[in-house]
Image (cartoon, helix red, strand yellow):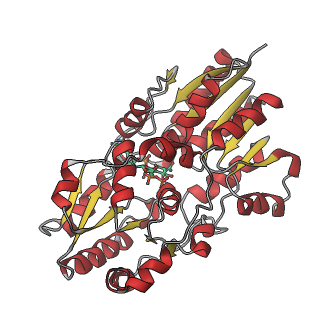
C-alpha cells in the first residue's frame, strides 16, 4: 500500500523549500503525494510553483490584502479540517515557522494525524523575535511526530527541550537542494546589465517586527552607504506587502544607484545572490542560501535562529540601528580583509540532499 503524504504550505519560502521534497516524493513508487497550498501568499507562491512545475491538488486561497495573523490562522483552520477528512493522509508535512504551518499542524493535531516538521529546531528563544515565527515553530514541535532538523544545532535545541531523540533526524536544509538546480555560470539579466561592473548589494527586507522605525533605519543606512560609494549599486526586489512598499518608497525613492524592482523568480534571485558582492537582509532563508554561496550577509534583525552562519563567519547580525548598519556596510565595502574574513568555505546548512533523506525516513517508518 502506498503511503499517502500530504504537504501543506502557503508562502514563497515554504514553497522554495518544499518543492524539492515534492519532486523527490513524486519520484518514489511507495508514496502518494498530495499538495495543498493555503495561498497565504498568492502571486509570490505561484511563481515558485510554476518554476518547479508543481501543480497543487488543493488551494484554500486564503490571502487578503494586509492580512492579520487572525485572518491567516482562522481561514487556514476553517479550510483545512474538512480537507483532512476528505484526503485522509497518513502523514502531513509542514515547513518552518509560518502561520500557515502552525495552523495546519494544529488542524492535524485536532484530527490526530501525524505531522512531520521540515526545518525543525530553529530557535532564538525570544518568543517575540522573530514575531510570530518563534512561537509558531515551537508550537509545531509540540505536535510533530517527525522533526527534520537541518543542522546538528537544531537537533540539540530539540533535545534540550525534551523531545525524544528517535523522532529527530538531521537532514540538512532543503533550500540547498533547490540552490543546486538554480545557479548557473554565464547567467545574465537586464537588471544585472544595469549593475555593470559595480559591486552589487542585494537587499530584501520584509519582517513584521521590522515594520515601522526599524525598517526606516535599515533603508536610511543603506541609502547613506550607497550614496558614498560610487562603484556600488543596490537592487531590492521588494516584497509584495503594501506596508513594506510604502516605507521603502518613502525612504529609497530618488537614489539612482538603488533600484527597487518586483520580486524575482527564484531562479533569477538565486543567480542575483551568486552575482552579489554582499547581501543586506532580514530574511530567514536568504541567510542559508548566501552562506552556501559564500556571500557575506548583514542580517538586519535583533536575533537569528541561524547562529551556525554567524559562528562560521558568513553572517553578521547587525540589528536595526541605523548607525550600526551603516558602519557595517562601510566596513565591508572599504576593508578588503574584513570582507574576505566573511567569505568562509562550506555551508553549515546542508549538502543538497536533504529531500532524499527526508523521503527515505518517511517511507521507512
Ligand atoms: C509571511 C510569513 C513570514 C515569512 C514571509 C516570507 C507569517 C505570519 N509570516 O510573512 O514568516 O518570512 O511570509 O515572505 O506566516 N502579499 C501579496 N501577494 C503575495 C504575498 C503577499 O499581495 O504573493 C501581500 C498581501 O497584502 C498580504 C501581505 O503581503 O496581506 C503580507 O503577507 P503575509 O503572508 O501576511 O506576511 P509576510 O510578511 O509575507
Ligand atoms: N526570493 C525570491 N525572489 C525574491 C526574493 C527572495 O525567490 O525576489 C526567495 C529567496 O531565494 C529565499 C526566499 O525567497 O529562498 C526567502 O523568502 P522571504 O525572505 O520572503 O522569507 P523568509 O525566508 O524570511 O521566511
Percent across and percent down for residue 77 are 59, 33
Q: Does residue 339 appear to the left or right of 133 in the view shown?
A: left
Q: How many marks?
A: 0
Q: Is residue 19 above or below residue 178?
A: above
Question: In percent of the image, x 55 and y 71: which residue is there?
Answer: 303
Question: In percent of the image, x 62 and y 36: which residue is there?
Answer: 104
Q: Report if residue 230 is visible in the image.
A: yes
Percent across and percent down for residue 258 are 20, 66
Percent across and percent down for residue 34 are 60, 22
Q: Is residue 199 above or below residue 286?
A: below
Residue placed most toward the observer, 78 or 296 = 296
Q: Can you name the residue that lies furthest to the front here? A: 186
Residue placed most toward the observer, 261 or 361 = 361
Please state, as top left, top right, bottom left or bottom right, where the C terminus lies in the image: top right
Question: In percent of the image, x 86 and y 58: which residue is there?
Answer: 162
Please state, as top left, top right, bottom left or bottom right, where the N terminus lies in the image: top right
Question: In percent of the image, x 42 and y 79: which residue is there?
Answer: 339
Q: Quadrant of residue 92?
A: top right
Q: Is residue 98 above or below residue 74?
A: below
Residue placed most toward the observer, 26 or 302 = 26
Q: Does residue 142 appear to the left or right of 299 in the view shown?
A: right
Q: Report if residue 98 is visible in the image.
A: no
Percent across and percent down for residue 175 are 54, 47
Q: Can you name the residue that lies furthest to the top here? A: 1
Q: Quadrant of residue 128?
A: bottom right
Amino acid at each position: 500500500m502506498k503511503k499517502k503524504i500530504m504537504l501543506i504550505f502557503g508562502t514563497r519560502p515554504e514553497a522554495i523549500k518544499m518543492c524539492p521534497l515534492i519532486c523527490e516524493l513524486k519520484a518514489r513508487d511507495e508514496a502518494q503525494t498530495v499538495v495543498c497550498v493555503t495561498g497565504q501568499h498568492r502571486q509570490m507562491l505561484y511563481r515558485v510553483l510554476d518554476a518547479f512545475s508543481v501543480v497543487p491538488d488543493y488551494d484554500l486561497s486564503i490571502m487578503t490584502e494586509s492580512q492579520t495573523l487572525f485572518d491567516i490562522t482562522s481561514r487556514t483552520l476553517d479550510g483545512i479540517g474538512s480537507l483532512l477528512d476528505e484526503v485522509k493522509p497518513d502523514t502531513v508535512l509542514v515547513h518552518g515557522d509560518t502561520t500557515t504551518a502552525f495552523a495546519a499542524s494544529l488542524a492535524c493535531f485536532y484530527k490526530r494525524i501525524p505531522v512531520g516538521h521540515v526545518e525543525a529546531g530553529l530557535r532564538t528563544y525570544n518568543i517575540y523575535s522573530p514575531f510570530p515565527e518563534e512561537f509558531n515553530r515551537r508550537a509545531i514541535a509540540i505536535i510533530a511526530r517527525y522533526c527534520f532538523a537541518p543542522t546538528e544545532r537544531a537537533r540539540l535545541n530539540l533535545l534540550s527541550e525534551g523531545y525524544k531523540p528517535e523522532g529527530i533526524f538531521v537532514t540538512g536544509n532543503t533550500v540547498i537542494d533547490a540552490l543546486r538546480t538554480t545557479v548557473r555560470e554565464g547567467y545574465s539579466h537586464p537588471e544585472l546589465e544595469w549593475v555593470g561592473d559595480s559591486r552589487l548589494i542585494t537587499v530584501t527586507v520584509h519582517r513584521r517586527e521590522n515594520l515601522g522605525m526599524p525598517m526606516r533605519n535599515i533603508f536610511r543606512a543603506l541609502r547613506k552607504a550607497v550614496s558614498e560609494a560610487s562603484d556600488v549599486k543596490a537592487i531590492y526586489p521588494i516584497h509584495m506587502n503594501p506596508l513594506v512598499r510604502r516605507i521603502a518608497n518613502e525612504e529609497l525613492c530618488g537614489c539612482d544607484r538603488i533600484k527597487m524592482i518586483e520580486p524575482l523568480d527564484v531562479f533569477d534571485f538565486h543567480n542575483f545572490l551568486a552575482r552579489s558582492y554582499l547581501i543586506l537582509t532580514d530574511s530567514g532563508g536568504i541567510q542559508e542560501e548566501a552562506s552556501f554561496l559564500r556571500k557575506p550577509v548583514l542580517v538586519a534583525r535583533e536575533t537569528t535562529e541561524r547562529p551556525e552562519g554567524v559562528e562560521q563567519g558568513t553572517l553578521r547580525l547587525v540589528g536595526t540601528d541605523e548607525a550600526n548598519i551603516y558602519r557595517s556596510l562601510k566596513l565591508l565595502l572599504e576593508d578588503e580583509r574584513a570582507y574576505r574574513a566573511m567569505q568562509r568555505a562550506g555551508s553549515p546548512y546542508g549538502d543538497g540532499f536533504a529531500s532524499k533523506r527526508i523521503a527515505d525516513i518517511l517511507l521507512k517508518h
